[in-house]
Image (cartoon, rainbow, N blue to C red):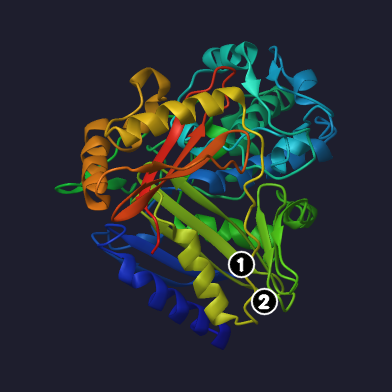
Amino acid sequence: MTAPADRLAAALDAGLSPRVGERTPAQVRGVFDGSGLVRVDAAGALPPDPAQLAFRIASCTKSFTAASALLLADDGLLDLDEPLADALDVPLRLVGATGAAPTVRDALAMRGGFPTDDPWADRQESLSDDAFARLLGEGVRVMWPAGERFEYSNLGYAIAGRILGLRGGMPFRRLVESRLLEPLRLGGTGFNETVGAPAGVATGFRPGPDGWEAQPVSGPGAFSPIGGLFSTAHDLARWAALLAGFAEHSALPASVGERMRQAVTPVSGDPAGAWHAYGLGLMVRADAAGRRFVGHSGGYPGFTTRMEWVEGADLGAVVFENAGYTRLTDAVTAAFDAAFPAPAAPLAAATPNATPWPETLALAEATRAALAAGGLPDAALLDDCVGLDLPLPRRLAELAAQLDRIGGVTVEDAFAHTTPADAAWELRGPHGALRCRILVTPHASPRIQKLDVAPTTP
């Protein structure tokens, strides 16, 4: 390996190895360049060839979705600037829409105006095409005019994926297989747990009161474009090298990766010059020295993935963990920053100044009252994903312990909103405070998709 590759591998080892056992049962890390993997490290109970073990890569799938869209556009089969509603084969009712209508490009660049929806959308993988059509016809929420600002939306990618299938003349999953997986010989990558990875498929877990709990695997469906793929370190490193321009293949022209890596939608920035943006199926960030880091994260029940590379350095990494939502991105970003140091420049945080939807406010008020009284909001207000992510009896037991530690609730603070679809507040007692937050679904009649209660930082 080269000296930079050694440096990156050492930084990944220092930052990620301690996570095994605490945050994840197992972990696979790979450093790659234009030739493919140059080093693989693994920990936990894994087969002899961990580079060929498939993990669900979740939202790293979005890079395959965006690449497929660009290929169809280059073939003259897809207009990226066509409004979603015009390109669909079923009615799309946008609730609260003002200004420009969201286009295919807007959806791929996370600027379609749809609310953030990870907890809910991550449980929609197997939704049938007919059920998805009904959902769109019944109405989905938008928060901003299209093209105005960044908001991470899986729903937008699911809609785009349906359109890709229509324009490509075949189901979305078959389109990705025929245009990308098969010609690139990514044989360990696919939309089903029966994918032909040489070392098999990893089991995903979540932490439970008695240890790690195996998680069921959702099958392919209408939401496969958001995160349905399984892949191996061998395959994902190959894919990332192609997107980065470290390697070449006729099935994926260099111009596709170049367009995907362009910063399209600003996310955040600071006066020192560091910034973070979304491209097309890829995240892009720059440090204060102007160096650019590109990649994507993936989180699903039971799995977390990160791919990242340094622009111009012919070097990157892929990391897989078989536990869900482990905050892997933070650790990988820190490792890259340690291997390629630059002056520190924190990204600007979002300012809570949005006007909530009336439905958001009503759900927040009901939740605040219920939590302060030691209970959970009525089950009818909760999307099913809340109980799937953490069983309601466990949530109730944890809440009781948290309220006991702060000595009960004496003050219920006002709400703050970073978007129309969320609300945050504090419940304060004589011995501390709890930070509470809800996020609601994008349905026309929203439900709570995320409910967080945690001690405030002293």
In percent of width and height, residue 178 lies at 62, 36
**Label 2 amino acid?**
Ala
Q: Is residue 291 visible?
A: yes
Q: Secondary structure at mark 2?
A: loop
Residue 246 rendering spot, x and y as whole percentages: 68, 67
Q: Residue 333 at x, y = what percent?
A: 53, 68
The reply to whether discs 2 and 1 touch (Cβ–Cβ < 8 Å) is: yes
Q: Position of residue 293 (x, y in %)?
A: 65, 67
Residue 228 lies, with reference to residue 94, above or below; the image says: below
Q: Nearer the viewer, residue 126 or 175?
A: 126
Mark 2 to mark 1 CA distance (whole Å) = 8 Å
Up/down of 377 relative to 285, above or below: above
Of all residues shown, which one is farthest toward the left? Answer: 210
For disc 2, the neighbor class at 10 Å (few under 14, some 14 to 19, many from 20) is some
Left or right of 301, for residue 349: right
**Amino acid type, mark 1:** Trp
Q: For the residue labelled by badge 1, is the local secondary structure a helix, a strand or a loop?
A: strand
Q: Judge whether residue 124 can be spotted in this image.
A: no
Quadrant of the rendered image containing residue 192:
top left
Q: Residue at x 70, y 40 (%)?
A: 108
In terms of depth relative to the viewer, which is nearer, 78 or 420?
420
| Residue 309's disc number | 1
Residue 221 located left or right of residue 202 = right
Q: Which residue is mark 2?
A: 313
Task: Depth check: give the residue in front, 32 or 273.
Answer: 273
Q: Is disc 1 surrounded by few (<14), some (14 to 19) or many (20+) residues within 10 Å?
A: many
Q: Dividing the picture into quarters, in which one does residue 457 lie? A: bottom left
Residue at point 28% right, 63% down?
48
